[in-house]
Image (cartoon, helix red, strand yellow):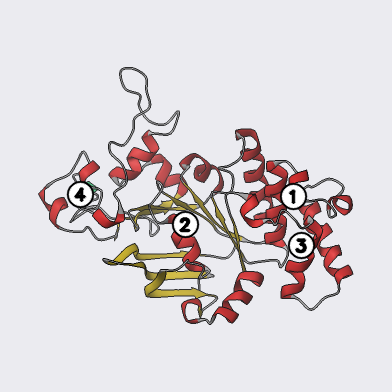
Amino acid sequence: MALLEVKNLEVSFALRHGDLVALNDVSFTLDKRERLGVVGESGAGKSVTGFAVINLISKPGRITKGEILFDGKRLDQFSEHEMRSIRGNHISMIFQDPMMTLNPVLTVGTQMVETLRAHRKISKAEAEKIAIKKLELVHIPSPERRLSQYPHEFSGGMRQRIIIAIALLTDPAIIIADEPTTALDVTIQAEIMDLLLELCDAQDMALMLITHDLGVVAEVTERVMVMYAGKVIETAKTIDLVRNPRHPYTKGLINALPGHGECDQENRLQQIPGTMPNLTEIAPGCSFHPRCDYCQDICRSTVPELRQIGESKERWVSCHLVGKGQL
Ligand code: SF4
């Protein structure tokens, strides 16, 4: 049994003119200790998927269909009280901007101790001991002294390490990391990704890494799920997807990576023409068809199903042409 199983998930936002469907029939699994990448452009539904798993979709959004199972239990049917226990103890989420998570007027130590004591009946001294251990795990030097400092006294990279330490406080089984390095310098980005990898191995955690950066996914994850306009359009083992993308959108993402795609005559990287559609204006048929070089009549009228392609059980693609001798 998968540690996390999401089945046919639909998330809608109730707007004045009717429901806007932000996630449409999204299904995936995450095994113990597995590292899954969730990739796509801004507006693809990646972050909504992460928030849906921990039931933190802000109003007027809500789960309108589907199931979310953690360790066999239906999270989508949990009360807010039960979900708080899941979020604190079993699934942690890390966000792009550490200052969104850290309280600027409380010391790092106070924030860590309060977080721990909200979930466990332990003394302040015990909580401090655990906090120091977690700061050591994320390689913060002199952790005892650092506990009494405020977030602004740390660099951006150090603050992201503290966020990771806070996420580790209750030894979760899953870390959901939503663009955890986007706000950081390139050299610090690599350090934080290395740290996440090291911690997943050492702490036996599964990782769901949400990012627009396929390069990061290629380095860090074992399996990848590509999203477009609120749907999953391709899943595969990361190595297979990077070497041999099948969906035209995934091909476009790979071709846009430095060192992967062919360059045009002026030696520029290839780009996918157009932009991700506004969710209120999704085209009929395949939602990628207005941007697709291979578009045919059927693509404009019929939504392609997500189908298993080829030998690997992991490879699923949502395209009318893939696997039918045309793509
Ligand atoms: Fe392109 Fe058609 Fe495949 Fe959509 S279904 S990705 S439009 S070829």
Vertical order, 157 against 149 (above or below): above
Q: Residues within 10 Å of mark 1 (few under 14, many from 20)?
A: many
User: Which residue type carries mark 4?
Assistant: Leu
Furthest-left residue in this view? 297
Q: Secondary structure at mark 2?
A: helix
User: Which residue type carries mark 1?
Assistant: Pro
Q: Residue at label 2?
A: 47
Contact between labelled residues 3 and 2, with CB atoms less than 8 Å apart: no
Q: On residue 112, which mark appears?
A: 3
Q: Nearer the viewer, mark 1 or mark 4?
A: 1
Q: Position of residue 98 (x, y in %)?
A: 64, 50
Residue at the location (85% across, 51% down)? Answer: 143
- Is ligand 1 within 8 Å of the beta carbon of the residue shown at mark 4? yes
Q: Position of residue 204 (x, y in %)?
A: 66, 61
Q: Is residue 281 left or right of residue 138?
A: left
Vertical order, 187 against 281 (above or below): above
Report, in whole angstroms, how far the alpha carbon at label 3 lies from the one at label 4: 52 Å
Contact between labelled residues 1 and 3, with CB atoms less than 8 Å apart: no
Contact between labelled residues 4 and 1, with CB atoms less than 8 Å apart: no
Residue at the location (81% across, 52% down)? Answer: 136
Report, in whole angstroms, how far the alpha carbon at label 1 lies from the one at label 4: 52 Å
Q: Residue at label 4?
A: 321
Q: Position of residue 241 (x, y in %)?
A: 40, 46
User: Which residue type carries mark 3?
Assistant: Met
Report, in whole angstroms, how far the alpha carbon at label 2 lies from the one at label 3: 25 Å
